[in-house]
Image: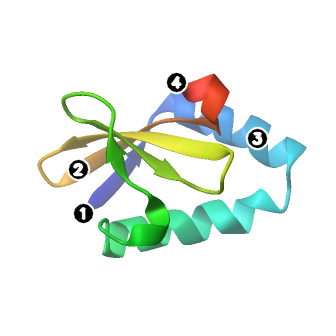
Amino acid sequence: MKLVATSRFDRELGRIVKKRMALAKRIEKTLSLFSSNPGHPSLRLHKISHDVYSLSIDMDVRILVYWKDDQVFLLRIGTHEDVY
């Protein structure tokens, strides 16, 4: 599986890491786990719409992804309130 970050995701990632530096390692670990085992229970992966899914970094921060074939586009990252 190939992870592709959108420009919006990159901007939001920069903002969220700037505010919460400790979150950077957790995001990296979560994305690594997701690419190797998308069904891992700690990701709390669930479908939002047709091909858009949400995965959890922690209880507050989520990543929205668009899944198409063997590519996963990282769409958004932010608090639950921001991305939904």
The residue singled out by tag 2 in the image is: 71
Q: Earlier in the sequence, mark 3 or mark 4?
A: 3
The x, y position of residue 10, in whole percent, is 59, 38
Q: Earlier in the sequence, mark 1 or mark 2?
A: 1
The quarter of the picture where the N terminus appears is bottom left
The residue singled out by tag 4 in the image is: 84
- Label 2: few (<14), some or many (≥20) within 10 Å? few
How far separated are the C-alphas under marks 4 and 2? 22 Å
Q: Earlier in the sequence, mark 4 or mark 2?
A: 2
The residue singled out by tag 3 in the image is: 16
User: What amino acid does circle 1 point to?
Assistant: Met
Of 64 and 59, which appears nearest the observer?
59
Quarter-wise, where is residue 38 in the image? bottom left
Q: Is residue 31 above or below residue 67?
A: below
User: What amino acid does circle 2 point to?
Assistant: Gln
The x, y position of residue 84, in whole percent, is 52, 24
